[in-house]
Structures are given as C-alpha cells and as structure tokens.
C-alpha cells in the first residue's frame, strides 16, 4: 500500500482528548494537503474523529477550524501554487477560507467506533488503560479487513503486549507524541520484533511530513521520555521527603522545585512539571511501569497521599493549570499544598526562609527562556555552571546531586537497552522536555 493509499481512510480514537485533538489536527492537515496535491475528489480522504461525547466532538471541530485558519495563513504560497486553476479566487481570504472548508470536510466526528472498520490507519489516544485499548483494537480488527495499522499513543504500556493481546502481529506501533502534539516536535517511535518493515517506513514518512523529529525507543514500559521523567520526579519526591526532617514538607517541595527550575535552568521546576502532566497521570504511569522493573521502587507514598486529598494537578480545558503541588496565577506559583494542614500555604509565608536556606543564585544566572534561545547558549551555560561548581550553598549542592542523578538515569536507559544511544536520551530531553542542555553533561561535578 502506498503512502497516499494508507492515508485515504484514517480514524483517531479519543479524538476529543488532550492528545487526540492534536493528533487529529496533524492528520487533518496532512490529509488535506494530499487531497490538494493529488487533486482528489471530495470524499477521497476520510478522517474519523471518534470519541464518546458529541459535545466534546463539537468543541473539537471549533479547535480544528481555528487551527486550520492559522495554518492556511502560513501556507498561502502552497495554496496559491496548487489552486492556480481557481480564477475566481482573488484575495488571500478566498484561499484561506477554501482551505478551512477542505480541512473540515476531511474530518467526520462520530461516537460510533464502527466507522473505524473501513480505516487503513488507526491512531489510538484513548485513556491509558491496557485492557480498554486491547478490547477496542480487537473489536475493530474483527470487522476491519484492511490490514490496518494501529498507531498507539500509549505513554507506558509495552507495544509488544498490545500487539500480542490484540493479536495484531506486526501492525501495532508506538507513535508517541508529546503534549501538545501540534506544537511539540518529538515523536518517540516504538516497534516490536514483528513490526512490518513497510509499517515502520510509513511511520517515518508520516512523521517527517508532520515535521516531527523521530527518536526510536526500544519497547520498555515508559520508553525513553517517561523512563527519564518518572525517575527524575521520584528522585525529587524522595529528596523533598528527606529534607522534611529539617523543614516542613511543603517548604522542602518548594525548595527542590526552585533548585530544579532556577539553579538547574530548566523550563519549569520538577514539581511544577508533575502538576502540568497531572499527579494522577504520573501516579498512573508509575503503576503501569512498576511490574516491569522489579528491582526498582517506582512508587510514591506522597503522590498517594495527595491523590487521597483529591489534589491532582493537570489542566482545565482552556489549558490553564489546575491546583496540584502548587496553585498558580498567570503561570506563576502562588501557594504550595501542605498535607499536614490540608490547605495551600501562600509562598510569601515561606519565601524569605527558603531563599536564605538555598543561598544566592550564581551571578551569571539567566532564566531558561533567555539562555535556551540565545545564540551563545553553550557559552552561557558553561560560564553559569562553572560558577555554580565553585559554590557550596545548600542549593548548589542539591543542584549538583540532582544533575548527577538525572545523568545516571539517562546513562542507565542506554545501559538497559531502552535507548539506543546517549544521544537519543539527550535528544528526547532536549526536544520533548525543552531542556536547555543534555542530561548527560560535563557541566556539573557532583
Ligand atoms: N497527556 C499527555 O501529556 C500525554 C502525553 C503522551 C501520551 N499520552 C497518552 O495519550 C493517551 C491519551 O491521553 P490524554 O491525556 O489525551 O487523555 P484524555 O483523557 O485527555 O483523552 C482521552 C480521550 O479518549 C476518549 N475515550 C475514552 N474511552 C474511549 C472509547 N472507548 N472510545 C473513544 N474514545 C474514548 C475520552 O473521552 C477522551 O476524550 C494515553 O494513552 C496517554 O498515556 C498522554
């Protein structure tokens, strides 16, 4: 089957979800472009957006319309080149409106799983539940006679298990987008020993056309991205719990977060990142990973305790942050949850004490945003870390220890065969997590 044929009938399961909506958009744009390039008749490229609620699907269409409009504005040259035969199109808006209409005409929203029976490619982005994913794959496969490919977005479930449980040998691939899929450049690609060579080649071609950077991960629960992030998060949690012998736990959480954010020049602190992903999601992924790593403790009592208090983090539908370890105002942390008092404590109450304890930032400090996008990034980082290396403050010691642990996690992912190379782990952290520098670095001496 050619690339174009494979993309003629596609379904996205969980299309109204956080990941599914972005995955749907990327497919809608790629399929519409193919439709335009091949001058295909309407109805020749069909993209089913499948989810459980009509209301959520209506909201999805509004999102697709907005994004199609923005995309059209950026690709006017392509549209004008391909629609030369439309003499009645005079203004840019004529081209933009037609593109939006064509994208929307490609997408068919539905709550009926049966529409996937005709698909040749099925993206799956439903909840992280192996039994549910397998049940749905089996149901589709029973009636789908197209030798369809199944691209799952699972964050943690080994692909070979989905493959064997659903009896889809060679046709289930991990095509792991990062959040949000429309913006994040990284796709982790996971194949199994059975994966059909054509299926892998198609995945690589599609990712390229979606302008994604592909990093292949081997088929271990959590893959590279969560393999690193989950262990990095657990280390932070352990550190905070350990420090709570000397200070209140909520202050320790604030301090570790500040060290991982500012002192280590990351886009956000580690507890902030857990909030962003969702405390419930992190706990869930750890639970999925645990049975595969018998020699490691991938469990956190702290996350359990927060979940018991219904403190979950994650995002509202408009993208704003829900309360988790912290509450936020315009993206800034304003309070931290205290498990003992079962309430949020304003940061202002612990800020001075915490700063005094942590010690000053190096004089060469600049925030992540400034450094990450600077042309002199490497020089700035070298200078900054050289200064941090000479310091022996509480924060400097913690930063060195944390950096070394992150480095060991990364090296271990290579040693245990999860990643094919150190460069692959570095690239996942640089692209998927927006780190300014490699986890395997020589900047800091522990
Ligand atoms: N959120 C992230 O940051 C992220 C990142 C990478 C991978 N993932 C993975 O992507 C998948 C989806 O995660 P999400 O965060 O988008 O979840 P989500 O809860 O936002 O979306 C899941 C969607 O699936 C729909 N759904 C559930 N059961 C269904 C069914 N039987 N048929 C059709 N639709 C159904 C839900 O209604 C919902 O809209 C999971 O496997 C997750 O592990 C998530």
Image: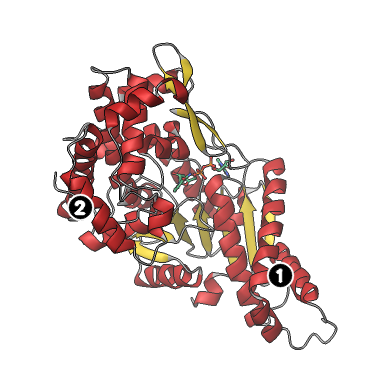
Q: Position of residue 7 (x, y in %)?
A: 56, 69
Q: Secondary structure at mark 1?
A: loop
Would you say the residues marked 1 and 2 are in contact, meaning their CB atoms lie under 8 Å apart?
A: no
Q: Residue at x 28, y 40 (%)?
A: 232
Earlier residue among tags 1 and 2 = 1
Read off the residue under disc 1: 43
**Residue 337 picture quarter:** top left
Inter-mark Cα distance, 1 to 2: 60 Å
Report if residue 410 is visible in the image.
no
Front residue (pair 327, 100) = 327
**In the rendered view, does 341 fall on the left or right side of 53?**
left
Depth check, mark 1 against mark 2: the one in front is 2
For the point 52% across and 58% down, the residue is: 183
Expressed as whole percent of the image width and height from the top left, the position of residue 104 reads 72, 62
Quarter of the image with the C terminus is top left
- Left or right side of 336 for 387: left
Q: Position of residue 33 (x, y in %)?
A: 62, 74
Which residue corresponds to mark 2?
Answer: 386
């Amino acid at each position: 089957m050619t690339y174009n044929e494979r993309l003629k009938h596609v379904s996205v399961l969980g299309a109204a979800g956080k990941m599914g909506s972005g995955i749907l958009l990327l497919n809608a744009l790629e399929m519409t472009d193919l439709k335009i390039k091949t001058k295909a008749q309407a109805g020749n490229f069909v993209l089913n957006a499948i989810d459980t609620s009509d209301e959520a699907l209506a909201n999805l269409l509004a999102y697709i319309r907005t994004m199609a409009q923005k995309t059209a504005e950026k690709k006017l040259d392509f549209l004008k080149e391909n629609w030369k035969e439309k003499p009645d199109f005079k203004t840019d808006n004529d081209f933009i409106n037609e593109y939006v209409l064509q994208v929307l005409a490609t997408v068919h929203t539905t709550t009926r799983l049966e529409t996937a029976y005709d698909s040749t490619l099925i993206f799956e982005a439903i909840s992280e539940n192996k039994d549910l994913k397998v049940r749905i794959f089996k149901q589709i496969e029973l009636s789908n006679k197209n030798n369809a490919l199944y691209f799952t977005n699972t964050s943690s479930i080994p692909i070979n298990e989905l493959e064997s449980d659903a009896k889809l040998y060679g046709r289930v691939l991990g095509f792991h987008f990062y959040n949000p899929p429309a913006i994040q450049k990284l796709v982790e690609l996971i194949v199994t020993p059975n994966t059909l060579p054509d299926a892998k080649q198609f995945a690589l071609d599609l990712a390229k056309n979606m302008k994604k950077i592909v990093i292949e991960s081997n088929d271990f629960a959590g893959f590279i991205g969560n393999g690193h992030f989950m262990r990095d998060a657990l280390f932070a949690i352990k550190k905070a719990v350990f420090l709570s012998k000397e200070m209140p736990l909520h202050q320790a959480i604030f301090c570790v977060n500040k060290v991982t954010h500012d002192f280590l020049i990351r886009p956000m602190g580690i507890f902030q990142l857990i909030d962003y992903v969702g405390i419930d999601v992190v706990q869930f992924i750890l639970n999925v990973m645990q049975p595969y790593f018998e020699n490691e403790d991938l469990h956190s009592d702290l996350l359990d305790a927060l979940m018991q208090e219904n403190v979950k983090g994650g995002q509202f539908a408009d993208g704003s942050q829900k309360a988790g370890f912290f509450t936020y105002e315009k993206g800034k942390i304003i309070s931290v949850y205290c498990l003992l008092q079962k309430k949020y404590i304003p940061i202002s109450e612990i800020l001075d004490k915490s700063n005094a304890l942590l010690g000053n930032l190096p004089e060469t400090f600049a925030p992540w945003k400034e450094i990450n996008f600077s042309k002199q990034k490497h020089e700035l980082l070298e200078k900054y870390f050289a200064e941090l290396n000479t310091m022996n403050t509480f924060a400097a010691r913690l930063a060195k220890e944390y950096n070394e642990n992150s480095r060991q996690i990364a090296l271990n992912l290579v040693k245990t065969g999860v990643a094919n190379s150190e460069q692959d782990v570095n690239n996942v952290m640089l692209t998927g997590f927006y780190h300014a520098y490699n986890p395997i670095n020589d900047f800091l001496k522990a």
